[in-house]
Image: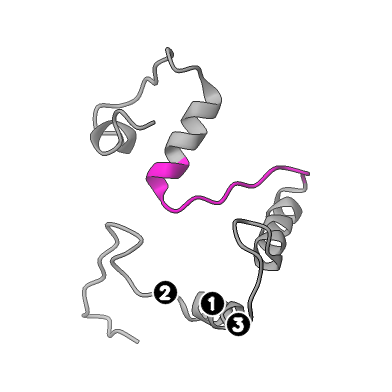
């Protein structure tokens, strides 16, 4: 465990270590073979937890990073010829402008 004086880098999800609980689940998931591409029991369990938390029978789409999540969400909200109005320093403008 880092001391209180150890700097923490929170600029991205890949600059810090994984929390112990998440690592434990990864180790458990790594013990056996399973179906791929979202057809596995782990994905089903996670999607069910989201439905339970939101108390809504929603579709859940897991993506690999924040840029993919933002692009997917924004594309679902508008057409290809629409625009997004945001602050000039918004993450989608400074780091993701022109995403798919």
Q: Are marks 2 and 1 in contact (CB under 8 Å)?
A: yes
The percent position of residue 89, horizontal first and vertical second, equals: 24, 33
**Residue marked by disc 3:** 28
- Residue closest to the far top: 81
Q: How is the image coloured?
A: one colour
Name which of mark 3 and mark 2 comes first in the sequence: 2
Which of the two residues, 100 or 56, is positioned nearer the viewer here?
100
Mark 2 vs 1, N-terminal side? 2
Q: Residue 42: image x %, image y %? A: 66, 67
The residues bearing labels 2 and 1 have C-alpha atoms spaced at a distance of 10 Å
Q: CA distance from mark 3 to mark 1?
A: 5 Å
| Residue for badge 1 | 26
The image shows residue 68 at horizontal and vertical percentages of 43, 43
Please report the bounds of the magenta region as a residue range.
Answer: 56-69
Q: Residue at x 51, y 20 (%)?
A: 78
Q: Do the residues bearing badges 3 and 2 touch, measured as CB atoms within 8 Å?
A: no
Quick check: 46 above or below 18? above
Number of numbered discs overlaid on the protein picture: 3
Closer-to-camera residue (77/6): 77
Mark 3 burial class by Cα count in 10 Å: few <14, some 14-19, many 20+: few
- Above/below status of 92 relative to 21: above
Q: Is residue 87 above or below residue 62?
A: above
Please tell me whether mark 1 sits on a helix, a strand or a loop: helix
Q: Tell us which disc is closer to us: 3 or 2.
A: 3
User: Quarter of the image holding residue 57?
Assistant: top right
Q: Quadrant of the N terminus?
A: bottom left
Q: Which mark is residue 18?
A: 2
Tell whether label 1 touches label 3 (CB within 8 Å): yes
């Amino acid at each position: 465990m880092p001391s209180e004086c150890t700097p923490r880098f929170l600029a991205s999800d890949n600059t810090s270590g994984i929390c112990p609980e998440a690592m434990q689940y990864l180790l458990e998931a790594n013990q056996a073979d399973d179906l791929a591409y979202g057809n596995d029991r782990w994905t089903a369990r996670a999607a069910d937890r989201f439905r339970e938390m939101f108390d809504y029978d929603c579709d859940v789409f897991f993506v690999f990073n924040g840029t993919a999540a933002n692009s997917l969400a924004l594309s679902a909200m508008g057409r290809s010829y629409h625009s997004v109005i945001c602050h000039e320093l918004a993450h989608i403008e400074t780091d993701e402008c022109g995403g798919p």
